[in-house]
């Protein structure tokens, strides 16, 4: 299984409007990368990719959200990425999917 396959089923709920765009970029960035066998490695790979895409380390970031112009596509919270949603819900969801 490849990492990009973990992203195929999109969540029904997001934190802010930039989150679905981050999801899509992460899926593309991880395309063709095999899913590691260890859950900790999966999480590390996701966190490293998130840091590369969003410019924030979810392990240490104190902000509630960050704004990234490249994810702004209209709407009130456009371009904003909700870090607690990624830290508490989306990354754990992807790790869980990797475990099957």
Image (cartoon, rainbow, N blue to C red):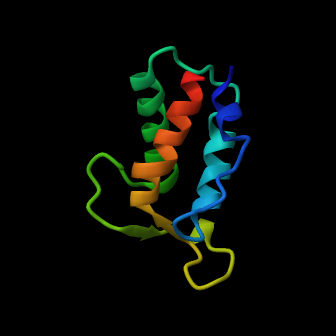
Residue 85 on image: x %, y %: 45, 58
Left/right of residue 61 with respect to residue 14 in the rendered view: left
In the picture shown, does residue 31 fall above or below 28?
above
Of residue 80 and residue 95, the one placed in the foreground of this image is 95
Residue 7 on image: x %, y %: 67, 41
In what quadrant of the picture does the N terminus appear?
A: top right
Q: Residue at x 52, y 32 (%)?
A: 96
Q: Residue at x 49, y 65 (%)?
A: 81
Q: Residue at x 52, y 50 (%)?
A: 53
Of residue 89 and residue 27, the one placed in the foreground of this image is 89
Residue 78 on image: x %, y %: 59, 77
Left/right of residue 60 with respect to residue 27 in the rendered view: left
Residue 54 on image: x %, y %: 48, 55
Left/right of residue 86 with respect to residue 71 in the rendered view: left
Q: Residue at x 39, y 59 (%)?
A: 84
Residue 40 falls in image quadrant: top left
Total tally of numbered discs in the picture: 0
In the picture shown, does residue 93 fall above or below 95?
below
Of residue 46 and residue 39, the one placed in the foreground of this image is 39
In what quadrant of the picture does the C terminus appear?
A: top right
Q: In the displayed image of the protein, which residue is found farthest to the bottom?
A: 76
Residue 99 falls in image quadrant: top right
Left/right of residue 12 with respect to residue 64 in the rendered view: right
Q: In the displayed image of the protein, which residue is found farthest to the top?
A: 37
């Amino acid at each position: 299984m490849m990492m990009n396959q973990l992203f195929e089923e999109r969540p029904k709920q997001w934190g802010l409007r930039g989150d679905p765009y981050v999801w899509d970029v992460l899926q593309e960035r991880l395309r063709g990368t095999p899913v590691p066998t260890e859950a900790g490695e999966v999480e590390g790979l996701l966190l490293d990719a998130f840091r590369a895409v969003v410019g924030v380390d979810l392990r240490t970031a104190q902000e509630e959200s960050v704004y990234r112009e490249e994810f702004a596509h209209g709407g009130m919270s456009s371009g904003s990425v909700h870090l607690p949603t990624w830290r508490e819900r989306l990354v754990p969801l992807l790790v869980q999917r990797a475990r099957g």
